[in-house]
Amino acid sequence: EIVLTQSPATLSLSPGERATLSCRASQSINSYLAWYQQKPGQAPRLLIYDASNRATGIPARFSGSGSGTDFTLTISSLEPEDFAVYYCQQRSNWPPLTFGGGTRVEIK
Amino acid sequence: QVQVVESGGGVVQPGRSLRLSCGASGVSFNSYGMHWVRQAPGKGLEWVAVIWYDGSYKYYADSVRGRFTISRDNSKNTLFLQMNSLRAEDTAVYYCARDLSAGEMATFDFWGQGTLVTVSS
């Protein structure tokens, strides 16, 4: 089973700042990584798939990069609605599909 | 307006069964793989099962294999999860989620709002 490790666990930033979230895989997953955003009481929302492709309707301030074992989700300038928990998910070697433990982006 | 709605959750005793359903309006399921993903209270996301668009393939997480069964009725645009021999550790919000493809993309683009399953005596 591929283990995904997200860091940091919590990111404290102010609106307008740049957010950089990391996801590291226990073995190479090529570019088969997705990112999701989840707000309290809501279902997750797909942001990025296959490492760098924005999903339909996702603002350009969200971008993804990386391949192999190291991946990054960048939010170029945080909007108030971006404060949430973010999860990465791999589809390289499955089943099982696996998620990272999440990074909480909170208001500083 | 796209709407994905799960139902069937509730409180159930350990060892008992429950059947979850997931229906959609405004979005088609029939050409897409469908998944169940769960989230224990205050915890992260855990993938549970997938069924291919035509039901030809089904895969399960080790934690539920042999106890849970995923199925679908494309004529009714509905997904199911039959959960038997429930355990306390199955307590979670269960989400149905649509795959980006027939099943192989294993990436979730539409999610329901979730239904809570609580296993407790």
Image (cartoon, rainbow, N blue to C red):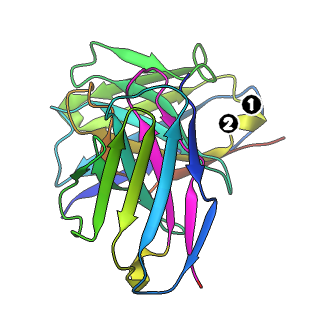
Q: Residue at x 50, y 25 (%)?
A: A27
Please name the amino acid that badge 2 sits on: Asp
Query: Badge 1 local density, few (<14 within 10 Å), some, or many (20+)?
Result: some
Which structural element holds mark 2? helix
Q: Is residue A98 above or below residue A47?
A: above
Q: Residue at x 22, y 36 (%)?
A: B76
Q: Quadrant of the N terminus of chain B?
A: bottom left
The answer to whether residue B105 is left or right of residue A42 is: left
Task: Judge by depth and name the residue closer to the eye, B51 or A58.
Answer: A58
For residue A11, above or below residue B94: below
Rounded to the nearest whole Å, what is the CA distance between mark 2 and mark 1? Answer: 5 Å
Q: Is residue A22 above or below residue B90?
A: below
Q: Is residue A54 above or below residue B38?
A: below
Rendered image quadrant of residue B41: bottom right
> Do marks 2 and 1 share a subunit?
yes
Residue at image mark 1? B87
Is-magenta flag for residue B67? no
Circle 2 packing at 10 Å, graded few (<14), some (14-19), many (20+), is: many
User: Label 2: chain?
Assistant: B
Q: Is residue A104 magenta?
A: yes
Q: Can you see residue A83?
A: yes
Q: Which residue is mark 2?
A: B90
Outermost right residue: B121
Bounds of the magenta span?
A84-107
**Residue drawn where x is 77% and y is 32% of the image:** B14
Q: Quadrant of the C terminus of chain B?
A: top right
Give yes or no for contact between labels 2 and 1 (Cβ–Cβ under 8 Å). Answer: yes
Amino acid type at image mark 1? Arg
What x and y, as percent, mark residue B31? Answer: 15, 31
Q: Is residue B110 among what the camera can see?
A: no
Q: Position of residue A76 (x, y in %)?
A: 33, 73
B27 sits to left or right of A31: left
